[in-house]
Amino acid sequence: MTISIKASDVKAPVAGLVGEALWAPHNRGLTLINKTPQAQKVATLTVGGVFSAGTVYTFELDGFELSYTSVSGDTNLAGVAVKIAALINADLRVRGKVSAEAASATVVVTCNWPGLDFTYDEDDANLSWALTTAAAEAGSVPFGRLVCSVDQTSDAGSLIGFLAVSTAFTAQVDSYVLTYVGGVNLECEVWINGEKYSAKHEMATDVDTSGAALVVAMNQILPSSVQASYVSGTDTFKVTAQLAGLAFESALNLGAGGGASRPVKSSNAGLATSVALAAKGISEHTYKEESAAYPKNAGVQTLSGGQIRVASLQAPGRGDAVYVELAAGDDAGKLFNSSSATRALLPASKCSWVRSKASDQTAVLEISF
């Protein structure tokens, strides 16, 4: 028997899927709950004027007019706020959407559901509304993107995950309290994405003059993603990430002759400021979602260890550095092999390029988060 294959029988290779986990016995995964940046709307209703019994307070909440008339037992404006909060909580027309709580002479009104809006208004000289927190829904998480977590639903609950994007992080700030020592150098070093930036300035005249001069010297060499500043009158020199999620290391010392007057450092560095520390893995492809992304409040299937395919137009080579895009937009959480002002370097021990496939515009990452 003869088996023959014609050219027409040869099919094109199957294109790789973005977010496709390549099978390996050491693969590790987890599920993250996608809630970021959802938020419940919060507004405050402040009671003003002079307290007196018989004053009518009228306001509008979610299209319904509510009114309260003070009594002598309220005692003061804080007592009026307590009664207005109780009025809101007892009104079934609005209680299904919001709840209220008094805090001094202010009523804090909170939506019961994240992302849901409510309206408010007043035409009363003794009342004033202010928005505290805007309603926000969770964002989607596309396949093949870096996802992070800094919290969980409860002590034994699921991890709350989010797409790696600057708006989900807090900017790192390193602060140094300076002591003036005339004629001694202030020496500052900052490490960003593996690069060192350093400058020094001889302390002259006083702390404020010296601190301001060091700021000028550092900002001439620092990238725009991290900047130095000095607050006059506080003796405080600061190094601040302009791109939240981009972690850096810094040191500020006195040169020879400084003695024991080393600047005192404080920093907020941690999970909330560093995408490299908060990273949990890459979002996997799934056929359960019609679009190429996980919707809000969905469980995000995440590969934390192993090999996974991601979108790439760069054709990265094996061992190339891995950077994550942190700027909000279509590329948020996407991986690259080149740096930019809006990208953060991921540790080589946690993430490295394996190979690329130009025909699919994809590449494979080896990860271990």
Image (cartoon, rainbow, N blue to C red):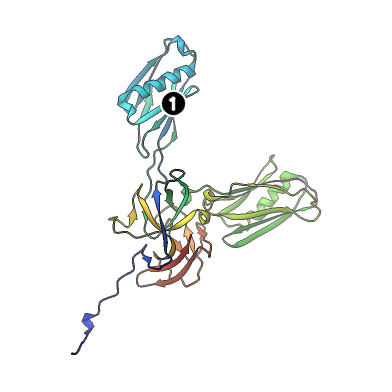
Find out whether residue 320 is within the magenta segment.
no
The residue beneath circle 1 is 101
Mark yes or no: residue 59 visible. Answer: no
Viewer-proximal residue among 364 and 47: 364
Q: Is residue 76 left or right of residue 330?
A: right
Task: Between residue 209 and residue 290, name the one nearer to us.
Answer: 290
Residue 237 position within the rendered picture, expressed as x and y whole percent measured from the top left: 67, 47
Front-most of 222 and 363?
363
* Left or right: 243 in relation to 40: right
Q: Decide if residue 237 is in sight here.
A: yes
Over which residues does the magenta segment extend? 175-183
Looking at the rendered structure, the kind of residue marked 1 is: Glu
Q: Residue, x 58% and y 57% (percent of image)?
A: 223
How many neighbours does mark 1 have within 10 angstroms: few (below 14), some (14-19), or many (20 or more)? some
Indicate the quadrant where residue 255 lies: bottom right
Judged left or right of residue 258, residue 247 is left
Q: Position of residue 46 (x, y in %)?
A: 46, 24
